[in-house]
Image (cartoon, rainbow, N blue to C red):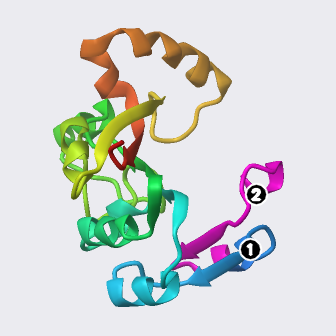
Amino acid sequence: MKGQGRAMYVMGLDYNSESIEKAKLLLDKAITIDLNNSTKVEEILNDQKFDCIICADVLEHLVDPLGLIRELYKHLNTEGRIIISLPNMNHWSIFFHLLINKYPRRNRGIYDKTHLQFYLLHNLPELAVYDLKFSLLDRNFRIFDQKQGNWDKTFMRIFKYIPWFRNFVTYQFIFELTKPE
């Protein structure tokens, strides 16, 4: 992280101009861009190479997430990695909403009304284009779509050790795609 002295150069790309204005105060470079436009992404990234590229809650909003990953792949250093977080569409609450025959439309979270793509655990490796290696790093456990407080975080840790149940309380997957050694 830039502020913690772990990164020499940090660049941010986002479609939300308000987020970019805030990011400009913290990053070396922050640019408003439609990540669906691979030509513009290539134009902005040019010949730059990165050790780490983070796609935090981004790919589910894109028309062609694989196209973006293919573009980002070109900008990874030899030992580079792409860290991705995606919501889990196998969360128990999805089934509840299917049962009551009403899918919520929210401004964020699993039910974000701007999601174009949906992912389950076994779909995640599909994002490993070319020769990238997939590794699940972590899961964000949550019982409810909206945060319920610290008890939720503490209580959810036990589900990490119950394989058959943990997918239903996984709110978000965090994984990485790395170039092979």
Q: Residue at x 61, y 71 (%)?
A: 12
**Camera-side residue of 122 and 114:** 122
Q: Earlier in the sequence, mark 1 or mark 2?
A: 2
Disc 2 packing (10 Å; few <14; some 14–19; many ≥20): few
Q: Is residue 8 magenta?
A: yes
Instruction: Identify the mark at residue 108; answer none if there is no mark.
Output: none
Instruction: Give the left or right position of residue 15, taking residue 73 as reference.
Output: right
Q: Position of residue 114 (x, y in %)?
A: 37, 68
Instruction: Identify the mark at residue 2; answer none if there is no mark.
Output: 2
Whether pointer 1 and pointer 2 mark residues with C-beta atoms closer than 8 Å, the reply is yes
Circle count: 2
Q: Is residue 85 magenta?
A: no
Q: Does 84 appear above or below 95?
A: below
Q: Which residues are magenta?
A: 1-20
Q: Does 18 appear above or below 91?
A: below
Mark 1 residue type? Asp
Q: Position of residue 108 (x, y in %)?
A: 48, 57
* Quadrant in the picture for residue 72: bottom left
Q: Residue at x 19, y 44 (%)?
A: 123
Residue 113 in sight from this viewpoint: no
Q: Quadrant of the C terminus?
A: top left
Instruction: Identify the mark at residue 28; answer none if there is no mark.
Output: 1
**Camera-side residue of 129 and 14:** 129
Q: CA distance from mark 1 to mark 2?
A: 9 Å
Is disc 2 placed on a helix, strand or loop? Answer: helix
Instruction: Give the left or right position of residue 150, taking residue 139 as reference.
Output: right
Is disc 1 placed on a helix, strand or loop? Answer: loop
